[in-house]
Image (cartoon, grey):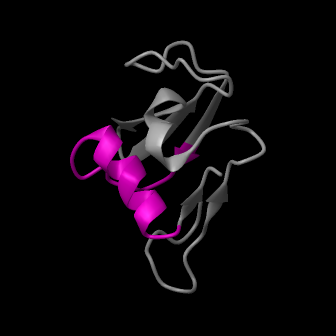
């Protein structure tokens, strides 16, 4: 991703095709966010059932230069609430 934020110029991840059946309510069963150095890594398991550490992910997405700023679940929910992540 390029620009991180919630304005009109911010990038958006559309993962609805990758996460067949995911909803905003159960997204934590599909995505885990973690801080790796100065980047955030989203671990994705397209069929659901992702492990807490994301080790069983079938895809990873790196958000370069982004700070998690708390825990991974809150980070993912903030992306959804800010219109930067579409899972449905």
Name the one closer to the observer, 41 or 71. 71
Asked whether, in this view, residue 18 is left or right of residue 76, the answer is: right
Q: In the image, what residue occupies the spot 54% across and 76% down? A: 10
Q: Is residue 37 above or below residue 55?
A: below
Residue 51 placed where, x, y %?
Answer: 45, 15
Residue 71 image-quadrant placement: top left
Asked whether, in this view, residue 33 is left or right of residue 15, the answer is: left
Q: Which residue lies furthest to the bottom in this view?
A: 8
Asked whether, in this view, residue 23 is left or right of residue 53, the answer is: right
Q: Does the magenta stretch include residue 66?
A: yes
Q: Residue furthest left?
A: 70
Residue 39 placed where, x, y %?
Answer: 42, 46
Residue 18 image-quadrant placement: top right
Q: What stretch of residues is rendered in magenta?
A: 62-83
Q: Does the magenta stretch include residue 59?
A: no
Name the one closer to the observer, 53 or 63. 53
């Amino acid at each position: 991703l390029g620009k991180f934020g919630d304005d009109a110029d911010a990038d958006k991840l559309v993962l609805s095709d990758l996460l067949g059946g995911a909803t905003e309510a159960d997204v934590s069963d599909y995505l885990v966010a973690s801080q790796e150095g100065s980047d955030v890594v989203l671990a994705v398991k397209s069929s659901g059932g992702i492990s807490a550490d994301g080790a069983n992910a079938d895809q990873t997405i790196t958000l370069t230069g982004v700070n998690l700023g708390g825990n991974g679940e809150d980070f993912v929910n903030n992306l959804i609430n800010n219109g930067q992540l579409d899972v449905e």
